[in-house]
Image (cartoon, rainbow, N blue to C red):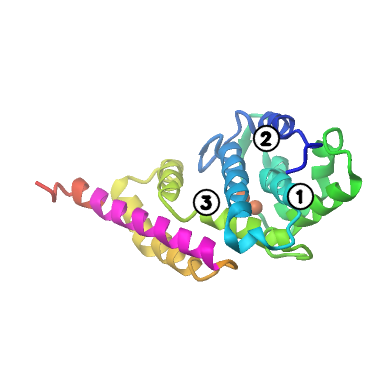
Amino acid sequence: MSNSINYDDLIKIYTRVFKGVKEYTGYEYRLDHGFRVFKYCKHFCEMDFLKNKNVNKDALLIAALFHDIGKIHKVNDMKFMGGYDDEKFKHDEVGEKIVADYLGKYVGNSELIKKISRIIGGHHGNNLTEFESYVIWDADRLDNSGIMLLIRLIAFNEHKERNLEGMFEYWNKKGRPNAISQLNEYHFEEIGLLAESRFNKLDKLMKSLYIECQAGDI
Ligand SMILES: [Fe+2]
Ligand SMILES: [Fe+2]
């Protein structure tokens, strides 16, 4: 990480953007998700699979923190982020366009800002030009593969006004098969293995939770 970039400042800016924002997956989910993807990427930079690759570490880490910045356009006056991406709105595309507005004062190098913008534009596989987009793409998926997914599941279940039985039904019919098929979609084997180990912990936890709910452990 370069000394010319003050990461504390960037974290403050990102915090200001998503502080107090609620979404279906929980209160300040986006804020914490950005921090986690940033931390994952920081660890990946020290791991063998990235260590010797030609990675622009600052571009990767700043893009990781701000990767979902485009979603800010979906936040309403009540600080609620609703709606999903569709034909007219793609948060990766929007993020690519607007991230410079947040970084300009803190990242002096305009080439670096352009690269960060392109990485964000490619973090879901559209307009892919930068290697770093693949790392964020995987880090993003990893965040949705383990016990963290249960937190999302519980928050989303509340939104849908489903009871626990409904949550298990959703998990077995949709959530679990989706999570399993995503395990084959990683670009980096090392991240895929981490995701698999996270998923196995979640799967075990869900089974134990179901047994408790049925009083099956007594
Ligand atoms: Fe995203
Ligand atoms: Fe994300």
The mark closer to the camera, 2 or 3, is 3
Q: Measuring 76% from the left and 54% from the top, which residue is drawn there?
A: 56
Q: Which residue is mark 3?
A: 143
Q: Which residue is mark 1?
A: 59
Is residue 132 found inside the magenta-colored segment of the image?
A: no
Q: Secondary structure at mark 2?
A: loop
Q: Where's residue 90, x and y in %?
A: 72, 55
Residue 175 shows up from this direction: yes
Q: Which residues are magenta?
A: 189-209
Q: Measuring 69% from the left and 65% from the top, which residue is drawn there?
A: 125
Q: Secondary structure at mark 3?
A: loop
The CB of the residue at mark 3 lies under 8 Å from ligand 2: yes
Q: Amino acid at mark 3?
A: Asp
Tell me the quarter of the image containing the N terminus: top right
For marks 2 and 3, give the CA distance.
25 Å
Q: In the figure, is residue 119 to the left or right of 37? A: right
**Viewer-side residue, 87 vs 217:** 217
Q: Measuring 70% from the left and 59% from the top, which residue is drawn there?
A: 133
Q: Measuring 84% from the left and 49% from the top, which residue is drawn there?
A: 112
Picture quadrant where residue 198 is located: bottom left
Report the disc number at residue 76.
Answer: 2
